[in-house]
Image: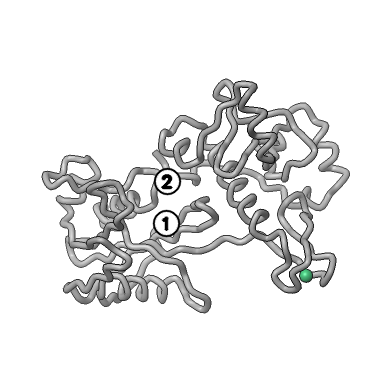
């Protein structure tokens, strides 16, 4: 399984966002379809998440030349649809179960993060005035002070400190039993990826690190992050765990990691599933990347 939400790239066709005539024509086009979302729920009928177009949808882009929109339903609309036999599932479950086309997962990841931004930016951060959606969903303008607002993506560093044939992983109390994962934290203003990786490792487990390498990255629509997956060469080994952040952290050998990925570790330790970037970081460590 490929890294979650990265298995399909589509044409975001950003020029169309500003073209009202083209957008109106696309809304009339029979091959144009929309996804329907209400908060974390994604609507599905007969295993299909695509529905007839409506007037309100934001424009996601072109999928093999066909326009795809996404519509945020009101609570009333959502409960009405359910009475007509529409089912719902959340995006994380759909991705973990691996039962939906990668193109749908990519589109729904965009839609979910975008709607989170709309819901939290109804008012202008500069003057408090009510903002209005523009550019088919990719901008909000404030008519009062003329500020323009753009969708946010929040970068998160997620990293494995490594030392020789050992790597360090931690667990938070909320993780499923036995699961250990890469350390992670939000980047702070003014930080480079390397600075954030070193700081987070120091804060969470008290380890000093040297070289940091960006290995892979992943959009993570819970609600709107970009995960920057790194490997960091540890220069110290003794742990000083921040128990407010972590329930535990420990060093694992490559043999441990193989067994954790295969779910055969004798102590019941488990690695995160393939949907998550941490799974692929552990594999990269085993492949000496
Ligand atoms: Zn304003």
Quadrant of the rendered structure where residue 2 is?
Answer: top left
Q: Residue at 60%, 25% (x, y): give it.
A: 86
Neighbour tally class for label 1: few under 14, some 14-19, many 20 plus, Cα within 10 Å: some
Is 7 drawn above or below residue 131 in the view shown?
Answer: above
Instruction: Mark yes or no: residue 41 visible.
Output: yes
| Residue 184 spot, x, y in % from top left | 37, 63
Quadrant of the rendered structure where residue 168 is?
Answer: bottom left
* Label disc, if present, on residue 6 of the rendered structure: none
Extreme residue toward the left, this view: 266
Helix, strand or loop at label 2? It is: loop
Helix, strand or loop at label 1? It is: strand
Instruction: Mark yes or no: residue 70 visible.
Output: no
State the quadrant of the C terminus.
Answer: bottom left
Is 102 drawn above or below residue 168 in the view shown?
Answer: above
- The residue under label 1 is 216
Q: Quadrant of ligand 1?
A: bottom right
Residues at badges 2 and 1 in contact (C-beta under 8 Å)?
Answer: yes
Q: Nearer the viewer, residue 188 or 77?
A: 77
Q: Residue at 62%, 39% (x, y): give it.
A: 37
Neighbour tally class for label 2: few under 14, some 14-19, many 20 plus, Cα within 10 Å: some
Q: Tally the numbered discs.
A: 2
Q: Residue at 85%, 40% (x, y): give it.
A: 24
- The residue under label 2 is 3
Q: Residue at 80%, 38% (x, y): give it.
A: 55
Quadrant of the rendered structure where residue 207 is?
Answer: bottom left
Label 1 beta carbon less than 8 Å to ligand 1: no
């Amino acid at each position: 399984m490929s890294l979650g939400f990265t298995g399909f790239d589509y044409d975001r066709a950003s020029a169309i966002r500003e073209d009202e005539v083209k957008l109106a024509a696309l809304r009339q086009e029979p091959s144009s379809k929309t996804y329907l979302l209400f908060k974390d729920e994604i609507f599905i009928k007969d295993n299909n998440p695509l529905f007839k177009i409506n007037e309100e949808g934001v424009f996601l882009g072109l999928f093999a030349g066909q326009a795809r929109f996404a519509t945020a339903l009101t609570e009333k609309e959502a409960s009405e649809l359910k009475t007509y036999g529409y089912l719902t599932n959340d995006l994380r479950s759909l991705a973990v179960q691996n039962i939906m086309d990668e193109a749908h997962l990519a589109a729904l990841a965009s839609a979910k993060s975008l709607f989170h931004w709309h819901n939290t930016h109804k008012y202008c951060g500069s003057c408090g005035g009510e903002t209005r959606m523009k550019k088919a969903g990719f901008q909000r303008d404030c008519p009062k002070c003329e500020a323009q607002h753009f969708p946010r993506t929040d970068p998160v560093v997620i990293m494995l400190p490594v030392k020789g044939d050992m790597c360090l992983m931690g667990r938070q109390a909320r993780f499923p039993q036995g699961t250990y994962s890469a350390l992670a934290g939000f980047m702070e203003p003014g930080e480079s990826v390397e600075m954030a990786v070193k700081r987070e490792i120091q804060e969470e487990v008290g380890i000093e690190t040297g070289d940091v390498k960006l290995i892979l990255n992943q959009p993570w629509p819970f609600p709107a992050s970009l995960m920057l997956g790194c490997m960091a060469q540890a220069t110290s080994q003794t742990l000083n765990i921040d128990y407010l952040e972590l329930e535990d952290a420990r060093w694992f050998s490559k043999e441990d990691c193989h067994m954790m990925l295969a779910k055969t570790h004798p102590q019941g330790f488990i690695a995160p599933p393939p949907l998550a970037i941490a799974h692929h970081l552990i594999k990269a460590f085993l492949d000496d990347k």
